[in-house]
């Protein structure tokens, strides 16, 4: 942490001794420029020095060491080779994309991921309007275009999505689907829902990603509720339902509460469904300033009753509560009194019926 040329030389020399591990940690935290010393170490043929030097080159993003890293990919020493492939994504630059493409086309399975990662990083440095065309060109010329799917997915463009969908329908289906799951594009919400609906074997994987995208979508609370509802209607596994219900807890709308209640009878989804319903009690969303833990009209007994009885709530009884000019419907349960159910709705939705502006329909 002190830095200085003398300390740098001492630490670099220690990489060749019994305290190499400690020297490595110190160099990673070194206060100063270490690139020239790392380049000197990379020029050696000693595997014991090359491995930590390659790790340092990767950690410091030493693009100047790229040529040496490329050369060490063919090292006869397995540890050096592995370290070189590990460093490749962090030192390669856009000007190295042709070399990376040639490596990817000729690579074995053990090194494919590292080369793909390097291409993803380097193509990501290109202007947005050039990323797709650059990768598409490599794909077209390759005998194994599916290897470029993960790279293509990172561009996130409409052209990339269309190309991956084409691959899903008529190419390497598994590779294309895996790449589609990584695309960051608002259109992917509808695309993944379509895949989930049409391909039962892929429903769970598609909806897991769909749930994340739906939670990030720039939509109204009602539209977000609709996205979760249509996914739940596909009857995915309990794990996927739990994830969707978990996200549903962030939707402060009456239909979301009603939807969560439908899953309270299933032992596998009762807990997340109850959490989704109970989360609606948080008042900060619609009634700023109200305490979140208690409500003036709710006793401790009622609070416990609402928390635990909600695990078995059934939308079988509709209890009507009148506000100044409108009726609101809340879920009723035989074991709860009218007074308790009123408070359940008050706490769950974070506001009293007397303040209908807090409700979302």
Image: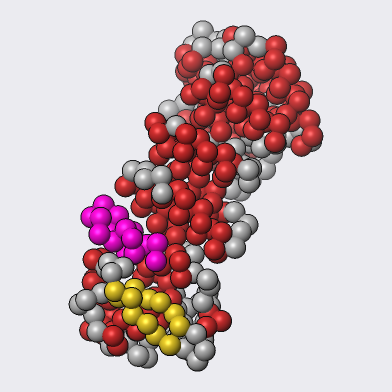
Write the start and end of the magenta stretch as one range. 258-274
Q: How is the image coloured?
A: secondary structure
Q: Residue at x 66, y 37 (%)?
A: 156
**Which residue extends farthest left?**
335
Residue 7: percent from the left, percent from the top?
A: 60, 39
Answer left or right for 271 relative to 145. Answer: left
Q: Is residue 163 above or below residue 214?
A: above
Q: Residue at x 37, y 62 (%)?
A: 260
Q: Nearer the viewer, residue 122 or 287?
A: 287
Residue 281 visible in the displayed image = no
Q: Is residue 236 above or below residue 224?
A: above
Residue 139: percent from the left, percent from the top?
A: 67, 17
Q: Is residue 357 above or below residue 12?
A: below
Residue 30: percent from the left, percent from the top?
A: 60, 42
Q: Is residue 198 magenta?
A: no
Q: Is residue 81 above or below residue 180?
A: above
Residue 346 visible in the displayed image = yes
Q: Residue at x 51, y 30 (%)?
A: 178
Answer left or right for 280 relative to 108. Answer: left
Total numbered badges shown on the rendered structure? 0
Q: Nearer the viewer, residue 304 or 72?
A: 304
Q: Nearer the viewer, residue 38 or 229?
A: 229
Answer left or right for 108 relative to 149. Answer: left
Q: Residue at x 32, y 47 (%)?
A: 238
Residue 84: percent from the left, percent from the top?
A: 56, 21
């Amino acid at each position: 942490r002190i830095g200085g040329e003398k300390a740098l030389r001492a630490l670099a020399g220690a990489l060749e001794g019994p305290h190499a591990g400690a020297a490595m940690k110190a160099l990673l935290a070194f206060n100063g420029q270490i690139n020239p010393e790392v380049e000197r170490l990379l020029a050696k043929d000693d595997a014991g020095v090359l491995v930590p030097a390659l790790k340092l080159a990767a950690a410091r993003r030493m693009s100047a060491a790229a040529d040496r890293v490329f050369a060490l990919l063919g090292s006869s020493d397995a540890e050096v080779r592995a370290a070189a492939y590990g460093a490749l994504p962090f030192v390669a630059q856009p000007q190295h994309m042709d070399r990376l493409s040639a490596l990817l086309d000729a690579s074995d399975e053990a090194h494919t991921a590292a080369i793909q990662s390097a291409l993803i990083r380097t193509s990501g440095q290109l202007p947005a309007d050039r990323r797709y065309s650059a990768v598409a060109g490599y794909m077209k010329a390759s005998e194994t275009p599916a290897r470029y799917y993960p790279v293509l997915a990172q561009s996130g463009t409409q052209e990339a999505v269309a190309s991956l969908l084409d691959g899903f329908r008529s190419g390497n289906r598994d590779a294309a689907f895996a790449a589609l799951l990584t695309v960051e594009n608002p259109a992917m919400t509808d695309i993944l829902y379509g895949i989930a609906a049409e391909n039962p074997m892929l429903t769970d994987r598609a909806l897991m990603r769909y749930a994340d995208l739906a939670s990030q979508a720039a939509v109204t609370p009602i539209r977000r509720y609709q996205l979760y509802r249509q996914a739940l209607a596909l009857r995915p596994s309990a794990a996927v339902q739990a994830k969707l219900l978990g996200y549903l807890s962030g939707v402060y709308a009456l239909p979301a509460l009603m939807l969560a209640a439908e899953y309270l009878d299933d032992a596998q989804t009762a807990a997340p469904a109850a959490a989704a319903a109970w989360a609606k009690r948080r008042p900060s969303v619609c009634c700023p300033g109200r305490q979140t833990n208690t409500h003036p009209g709710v006793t401790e007994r009622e609070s416990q009753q609402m928390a635990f009885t909600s695990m078995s709530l059934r939308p079988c009884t509709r209890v009507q509560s009148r506000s100044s000019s409108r009726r609101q419907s809340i879920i009723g349960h035989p074991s709860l009194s009218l007074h308790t159910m009123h408070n359940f709705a008050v706490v769950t939705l974070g506001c009293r019926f007397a303040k209908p502006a807090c409700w979302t329909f």
